Amino acid sequence: MTVPVSDVDRAKAFYVEKVGFNADHDHRVNEQIRFVQLTPPGSPCSIAIGTGLEDGMAPGSVQGLQLVVADADAARAELAGRGVEVSEVNEFPWGRFVFFKDPDGNGWNVQELPPRD
């Protein structure tokens, strides 16, 4: 998933230093394209940020990016401890959630799944 950002270096620092994602790649393909791949710890899925990747998407326009974690309380504590403005834990029939936004306003849902039968 490409996440549109206005400042690649600021966004990369936020995702790596504050949120704790791994910086897998940071490659300038040419003068118009820079590709940065970031992966949440333990996840097989990544996001991409950069220049020349957005295909018309405005910075901050992506909402509802989803991460699934084992413990919403622990995820909230870790994010808050890293300086991320994160919501309190919200309880819904479909899981426990915390929410945060990146510096551009792209919105993330961090979900603890409910017990499965």
Image (tube, rainbow, N blue to C red):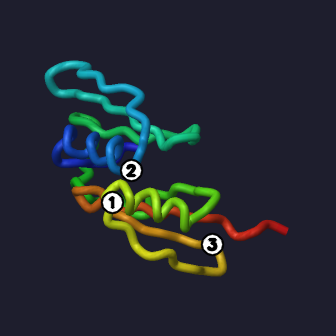
Q: In this orientation, which residue lies closer to the viewer: 66 or 86?
A: 86
| Residue at which label 1 appears | 84
The tally of labels here is 3
| Residue at which label 3 appears | 95
User: Please, what is the three-letter code of the amino acid marked with disc 3?
Assistant: Gly
Give the Cα separation between the discs numbered 3 and 2. 21 Å
> In terms of image quadrants, where is residue 108?
bottom left
Q: Quadrant of the C terminus?
A: bottom right
Contact, CB < 8 Å: mark 2 with mark 1?
A: yes
Q: Quadrant of the N terminus?
A: top left
Between disc 2 and disc 1, whose residue precedes? 2
Q: In this orientation, which residue lies closer to the viewer: 36 or 2?
A: 36
Q: Position of 60 compared to 44: left or right?
A: left
Question: x and y percent of residue 77 in the render?
Answer: 46, 63
Give the Cα separation between the discs numbered 3 and 1. 21 Å
Q: In the rendered view, would you say 58 is above or below 96?
A: above
Q: Which mark is residue 19?
A: 2
SS type, badge 1: loop
Give the Cα separation between the discs numbered 2 and 1. 7 Å
Q: Position of 76 compared to 35: left or right?
A: right
Q: In this orientation, which residue lies closer to the viewer: 14 or 2?
A: 14
Question: x and y percent of residue 90 in the render?
Answer: 52, 78
User: Please, what is the three-letter code of the amino acid marked with disc 2?
Assistant: Val
Contact, CB < 8 Å: mark 3 with mark 1?
A: no
Contact, CB < 8 Å: mark 3 with mark 2?
A: no
Which residue lies at the image location 53% right of the left edge and 70% below the top edge? 97
Q: Which mark is residue 61?
A: none
Q: In the rendered view, would you say 36 is above or below 28?
A: below
